[in-house]
Image (cartoon, grey):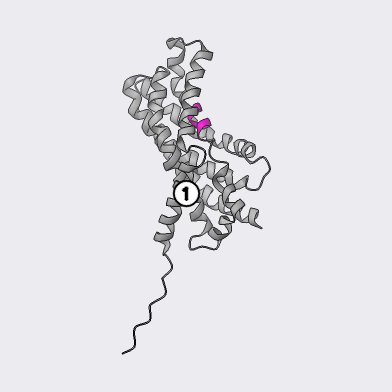
Amino acid sequence: MSRPVDAEPRPPGLRGATRVLLERELDLAWSGGGGPLLACGFFACLTAVLPLAAGGDPRTLSPVAGGIAWLALALASLLSLERLFERDLEDGALDLLAIGHLPLESVVLIKALAQWIAVGLPLALTAPVAALALGLPVSLAPLAALSALIGGAGFALTGALGAALALGAKRGGLLIAVVVLPLFIPPVVFGAGALERAASGQSPAPALAFLTAYVLFAGVIAAFAGAAAVRNAQG
């Protein structure tokens, strides 16, 4: 009897391709430039410097603690966005991703998810400590972490969109900041508003609902607009 011919290896399906790409992006996020440690360090330093500039009076800092923490959170989320697509364009990996099993829309969302896991989650864990240092009541620490966790997803999605739009630019980091910072305003407003409402005895649910709606809207816009920007950069 003839020996059976070994079947050719089957190409990975969508689930396998998604897992492989997500693991790759997480490895790159952790190994490139210190990963989330740089963002968390910048976040901690910024929240330490701002009280010194404001005089350090708890009566002055406490009413604006949530807003200051969210502003620092938004700025810290900018640090690792420049290399999100640029490194793939430089080494040719972006061309392989464009002809791979996953559509470019999914690639953009997976990159944003990896950015959220690698940077957004550590920043969300750091946010309560920073907010408490600024004078936020201890009882609001869980809310600070929850709102930062939701808002971090919005930062990652809009950040991925900005990184795609700045793809190939000579000063990509500056262009990303110009594009992304206006898009960061809604989550900063809603996140700080949730903390302010809770501090005044009101329910933070409306502000959190608006924050979640922003994340969903950003997911749709970032997927299609980011994929179009990547195609334009490749062409």
Query: Where residue 44 sits in the image (x, y, percent)?
Result: 46, 25
For this orientation, the residue located farthest to the right is 170
> How many discs mark residues in the rendered view?
1
Q: Does 193 sit left or right of 93 as displayed?
A: left
Query: Where residue 102 sits in the image (x, y, percent)?
Result: 48, 60
For this orientation, the residue located farthest to the bottom is 1
Magenta segment's dominant SS is helix
Query: Where residue 151 sits in the image (x, y, percent)?
Result: 44, 36
192 above or below 19? Answer: above
Q: Name which residue type carries label 1.
A: Glu
Q: Which residue is tagged 1?
A: 25
The span shown in magenta is 71-77
216 above or below 78? Answer: below
Query: Where residue 49 sits in the image (x, y, percent)?
Result: 51, 18
58 above or below 130? Answer: above
Q: Which residue appears at 49% of the width and 41% of the height? A: 156
Q: Which residue appears at 64% of the width and 36% of the height? A: 174
Q: Which residue appears at 42% of the width and 51% of the height? A: 23
Q: Is residue 59 visible in this depiction of the protein?
A: yes
Where is the C terminus found, in terms of image quarters? bottom right
197 above or below 100? Answer: above
Q: Does 24 sit left or right of 230 as displayed?
A: left
Q: Please, what secondary structure does the residue beneath circle 1 have?
A: helix
Of 201 and 183, the residue lying toward us? 183
Q: Is residue 204 visible in this depiction of the protein?
A: no
Of 173 and 213, the residue lying toward us? 173
